[in-house]
Image: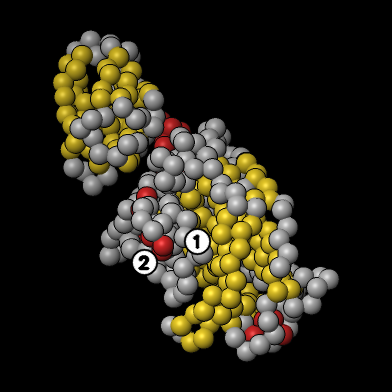
C-alpha cells in the first residue's frame, strides 16, 4: 500500500457569514460537504489512486481538517454484507482558501473563511468479481442548515464504489471542479447553479442528478456514533433525516424552490423562495457504450440570499446594526439613528415564534443577553408607529 502525503427584506450582507458559519466546539460542526474520486495508477497495474476533498467553514472555532484521516475499504459480498478489506491512515495533502468572488445578487462577497482540504492516497484492489467501497466518515455538519434535522449531530460519509467492470476497463471516475459558483442562490430570482463535472475519459457520457445525503459518525459515542469512526463503518449507509416532509434528496428546497437539473452542461435551474442554507447531494453517473460504470457524489450546500433592497422597498425607518453577529453570550443593537422614543424590539425564529419582545428607547445602544434565546438563525424587528425594519442574526451556543 502506498500513501502519498500531499484542505425580508433585510440588507442581506451580514446574513451570509452568519448562515454559513454556525460552528460549535471541537465536536466540529464544520463540514459543508465533500467528494471522493478515483483513477488507475499510471505505473502500478492493479493499484488505484484516490482523492478526497472536504469543504469546511473555518470561522468561529470550528474543527480543523483532520490530519491524518482514517480510510476503510470494504469488499461487497451481497447487498447487506460487507467485509473489511483494508484500513489505514492518510495525511492531509493541502488546504486552499476558496475565493467566492462576487455574489450573484449584485454585491461583493463579505469576508468570511471557507476552505477545502485534499487527501490523496493509493491502494491495490484485487482483480476479482467483487465491488469494493472506499470510504471516509466524519461528524458533524453546519448547525445552520435548515432542511435537515439537527445537522449539528449528523456526520458525512464520502465514498466511491469500484465495480469489476470499472476496474477491468481501467476507468477514471468523473471529477468535480470549483464550487465557487455553485454556492449562492438569489431569493425570488431565476438562476442557474452550475456544477463543474468533467470525465477524464472523454468517450464516456455523464448524467448528473440529485441523490441521497449520506450520514456518517455522530456527535458523541463510540464506534459508528463517534465523531471519527475508526475504521469507518461499513455499508449499507444511512441517509439524513429532513426537517420537513416537503424536503427530500430529490427536492432539497422542498416547496421553496424548483429541483430541475439540466444536462450539458449540468446545472440546477432554480428560483429559491426562502432564505437559508440548504444541504444537498449530486451524483454524476458514468456510462460507456451504454454500460453503467458507476457514479461519484458531491455533497454541498446552497445559501439563498436576498438581493439588495430596491428604493421602493426601503423602510421609512432608519437602518440599524447588530454586533457581534454571530452572537455568543450577548449582542448590541445600534439604535442611534432612531428618534429618542419608545421602540419595540421583537426577536422570532424562522417559523415566526416570538422568542423575546421588549420596549426600549431610540437614540441608544441596547445590549441584550442571549440567555433566553435559542441557537440558530433569528429575525430581529424594530417596530414603531405601525412601521418595521428587520435584520437576521445568529446565536451560537
Disc ID at residue 248:
2
Which residue is found at the position 73% from the left and 64% from the top?
2
Q: In which quarter of the image is the C terminus?
A: top left
> Does 360 appear above or below 34?
above
Q: Which type of secondary structure does the marked residue at label 2 adopt?
A: loop
Q: Is 227 placed above or below 283 here?
A: above
- Crowd around label 2: few <14 · some 14–19 · many ≥20 (10 Å): many
- Front residue of 366/236: it is 236
Q: Which colour scheme is used?
A: secondary structure
The N terminus: image quadrant: bottom right
Mark 2 touches mark 1? (CB < 8 Å)? no
Residue 267 seen anywhere in this rendered image of the structure: no
Q: Where is residue 308 in the image (x, y as percent from the top left)?
A: 45, 36
Q: Residues within 10 Å of mark 1 (few under 14, many from 20)?
A: many
Q: Mark 2 or 1 closer to N-term?
A: 1
Give the residue displayed 35% in from the left and 36% down from the top.
396
Helix or strand or loop: what does disc 1 sit on?
loop
CA separation, marks 2 and 1?
30 Å
Give the numbered dot on residue 307: none
Q: Where is residue 175 in the image (x, y as percent from the top left)?
A: 66, 64
Judge left or right: residue 220 versus residue 124: left
Across and down, in percent, residue 211 comes to 47, 70
The residue nearer to you, when weighing 226 against 29, is 226
Q: Nearer the observer, disc 2 or disc 1?
A: 1
Question: x%, y% of residue 283?
Answer: 54, 69
Residue on which the image places disc 1: 230
Quadrant of the rendered image containing residue 392:
top left
Can residue 92 be seen at all in this image of the molecule?
Answer: yes
Horizontal side, residue 183 vs residue 389: left or right? right
Q: Give the residue displayed 49% in from the left and 36% down from the top.
A: 59
- The structure residue drawn at horizontal position 28% and vertical position 19%, both measured from the top left corner, is 367
Whether 206 is drawn above or below 61: the answer is: below
Amino acid at each position: 500500500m502506498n500513501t502519498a502525503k500531499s484542505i425580508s427584506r433585510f440588507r442581506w450582507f451580514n446574513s451570509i457569514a452568519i448562515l454559513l458559519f454556525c460552528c460549535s466546539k471541537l465536536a466540529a460542526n464544520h463540514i459543508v460537504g465533500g467528494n471522493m474520486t478515483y483513477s488507475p495508477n499510471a505505473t502500478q497495474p492493479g493499484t488505484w489512486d484516490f482523492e478526497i476533498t472536504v469543504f469546511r467553514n473555518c470561522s468561529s472555532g470550528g474543527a480543523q481538517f483532520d490530519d491524518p484521516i482514517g480510510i476503510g475499504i470494504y469488499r461487497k459480498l451481497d447487498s447487506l454484507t460487507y467485509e473489511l478489506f483494508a484500513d489505514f491512515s492518510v495525511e492531509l495533502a493541502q488546504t486552499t482558501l476558496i475565493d467566492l468572488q462576487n455574489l450573484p445578487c449584485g454585491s461583493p462577497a463579505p469576508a468570511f473563511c471557507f476552505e477545502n482540504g485534499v487527501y490523496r492516497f493509493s491502494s491495490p484492489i484485487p482483480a476479482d468479481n467483487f465491488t469494493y467501497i472506499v470510504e471516509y466518515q466524519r461528524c458533524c455538519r453546519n448547525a445552520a442548515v435548515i432542511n435537515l434535522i439537527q445537522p449539528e449531530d449528523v456526520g458525512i460519509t464520502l465514498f466511491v464504489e469500484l465495480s469489476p467492470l470499472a476496474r477491468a476497463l481501467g476507468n477514471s471516475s468523473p471529477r468535480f471542479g470549483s464550487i465557487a459558483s455553485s454556492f449562492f442562490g438569489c431569493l425570488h430570482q431565476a438562476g442557474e447553479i452550475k456544477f463543474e463535472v468533467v470525465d477524464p475519459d472523454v468517450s464516456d457520457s455523464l448524467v448528473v442528478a440529485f441523490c441521497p445525503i449520506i450520514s456518517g459518525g455522530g456527535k458523541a459515542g463510540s464506534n459508528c456514533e463517534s465523531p471519527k469512526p475508526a475504521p469507518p463503518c461499513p455499508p449499507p449507509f444511512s441517509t439524513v433525516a429532513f426537517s420537513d416532509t416537503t424536503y427530500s434528496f430529490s427536492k432539497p428546497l422542498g416547496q421553496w424552490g424548483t429541483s430541475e437539473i439540466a444536462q450539458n452542461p449540468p446545472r440546477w435551474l432554480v428560483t429559491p423562495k426562502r432564505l437559508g442554507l440548504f444541504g444537498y447531494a449530486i451524483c454524476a453517473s458514468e456510462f460507456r457504450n451504454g454500460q453503467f460504470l458507476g457514479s461519484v457524489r458531491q455533497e454541498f450546500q446552497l445559501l439563498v440570499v436576498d438581493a439588495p433592497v430596491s428604493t421602493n422597498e426601503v423602510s421609512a425607518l432608519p437602518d440599524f446594526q447588530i454586533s457581534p453577529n454571530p452572537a455568543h453570550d450577548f449582542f448590541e443593537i445600534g439604535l442611534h439613528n432612531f428618534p429618542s422614543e419608545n421602540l419595540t424590539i421583537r426577536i422570532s425564529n424562522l417559523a415566526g415564534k416570538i422568542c423575546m419582545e421588549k420596549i426600549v428607547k431610540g437614540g441608544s445602544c441596547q445590549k441584550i443577553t442571549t440567555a433566553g434565546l435559542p441557537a440558530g438563525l433569528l429575525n430581529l424587528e424594530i417596530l414603531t408607529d405601525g412601521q418595521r425594519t428587520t435584520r437576521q442574526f445568529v446565536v451560537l451556543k
